[in-house]
Every structure is written in C-alpha cells, then in structure tokens.
Image (cartoon, grey):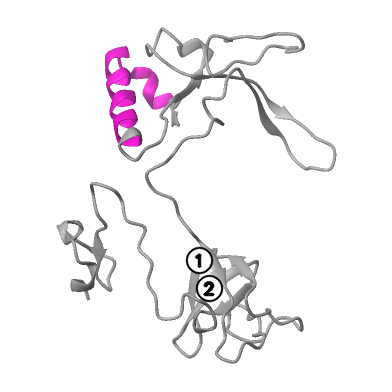
Amino acid sequence: MADVEASQQQYLSRATLDACNQAFAEVVKLYGYRPDVYTMGSWVNSKMSNAGWIASYPYDPTGKTWYSNNNAWQYQSTAQFQGSYGNFDVSTLYNNFYTGGQQVVNTINNTVTIQTWNANPTAMLNSKGDPYMTTPLANGTKWQGLGIAKNKDDTAMICIGNNEYVRQDCTTLNGLVVINYAANYGVNAYNSKGQELKGTNLIKNKAEIS
C-alpha cells in the first residue's frame, strides 16, 4: 500500500504522483502482491488519478457509504474499543481486494521447532543468555521466531517472545542460515561492517558467499 498524503507531496504535480504510484505498483506486482494507493479524499482525482483506499472523516459516519466505488473507505481515526487502549483507524471494505486469497511468490517461514539431541526439554533464556523461566521448552513444540541475538558464549539465540530466547542449537535451525530469496532479484550480501557487496545478488550458489 502506497501511503500518499505527506505534506511534501502536495507540491508535486498530478503526473508526478501518478508516475510514482505506478512505479511502486510495478515493484509490488513483481513479487506477486496486489498494489494499491491510500490517500485522503481531497486528493482523489485532484492530486492523483487513481486510489483504492480513501480516508475521509464525516462528523457522523453512521449509515454512510462514502467512496463505495473504491476498495475501502477509512471513516474515522479516533475510534475506541472496550478492552483496548488508545485510538484506532477504522475502515469499511467494499470488496475482498485486501482479504481475498492469492498465491504469492514468496512466503516467510519463521517457525522455530525445539529439537534437542536427547529429546529432553530445553531452558528458556533471557536476552543475556541466562535461564529465564522455570517452565522448560518441550521438545517438538513450535514457536514463532522474532529475531536472532548473540548469546554470551558467542553462539546464537532465537527470540520467541518478550525477553524470551532459545539457543539456536536446540532447534531444527541448528547450523542453518535461511535466506528468503527474492524472485528475479536475488539477495545481496553484506560484510561485517554492514556495507553492501554489490552484485552478490547475481550469484546463483549462495554457498560461494563467505
């Protein structure tokens, strides 16, 4: 979703914004996803030619169906719900453009499965690598991987919650580096200083990259 509503963009011409939106859409479609544009109602057909998700806030949205020929209408930004804190954006969807099933080019599998050599449970660690909770992680259980961190013994730990980690060598990801390959582009490598190594995305055998 291209969010086109910044104050700096109001000085761009309609043709320029249309070209920017089209460039964004082409890249999104390249990876197998649906592109769309979000903007405010006053910019529709004035600052750009096409937009699918329109934000416009009437004093009372009850019974109204503004922008029903578009994919969605955001009618409020200060909605509140019982049991939740703060204000929320709320929208009406007029079709399944954002929710309909679609086969995407790439998916990310970030499931972490506990696997120890003796099939015994393993300890949950905190961000410092110390035992964190009395309840161990049962062998074979699956967790969502939320990132990776360095343990105090220079091994890797996988984050599975708020200040909750598990040693990588106690999972099915032991010794593995998983690269989420970008179709028709590849993956650029970086050195230890975080500098991009140009052209490495063209190397087909990633094992060549040390």
Check residue 18 for magenta coloring. Answer: yes
Residue at 73% from the left image edge and 81% from the top image edge: 133
The answer to which of 1 and 29 lies nearer the viewer is: 29
Give the quadrant of residue 118. Answer: bottom right
The answer to which of 140 and 92 lies nearer the viewer is: 140
Q: In the image, residue 91 lies at what x, y percent?
A: 64, 24
Indicate the quadrant containing the C terminus: top left, top right, bottom left or bottom right: bottom left
- Tell me the magenta residue range: 7-28
Query: Disc 2 designates what residue?
Result: 158
Crowding at label 1, few (<14), some or many (≥20) Cα neighbours within 10 Å? few
In the displayed structure, 61 sits above or below 159; it is: above
Give the quadrant of residue 46. Answer: top left
Q: Secondary structure at mark 2?
A: strand
Q: CA distance from mark 1 to mark 2?
A: 6 Å
Magenta span dominant secondary structure: helix
Q: In the image, residue 12 lies at what x, y percent?
A: 31, 19
Q: In the image, residue 26 lies at what x, y percent?
A: 29, 30
Q: Are marks 1 and 2 in contact (CB under 8 Å)?
A: yes
Query: Disc 1 designates what residue?
Result: 147
Q: Secondary structure at mark 1?
A: loop
Q: In the image, residue 89 lies at what x, y percent?
A: 65, 30
In the displayed structure, 84 sits above or below 174; it is: above
Crowding at label 2, few (<14), some or many (≥20) Cα neighbours within 10 Å? many
Check residue 178 for magenta coloring. Answer: no
Amino acid type at circle 2 is Ile
* Disc assigned to residue 185: none
Q: Upstream in the sequence, badge 1 or badge 2?
A: 1
Residue at 42% from the left image edge and 30% from the top image edge: 34
- Using residue 182 as the reference point, say whether residue 95 is left or right of it: right
In the displayed structure, 142 sits above or below 97; it is: below
Amino acid type at circle 1 is Gly
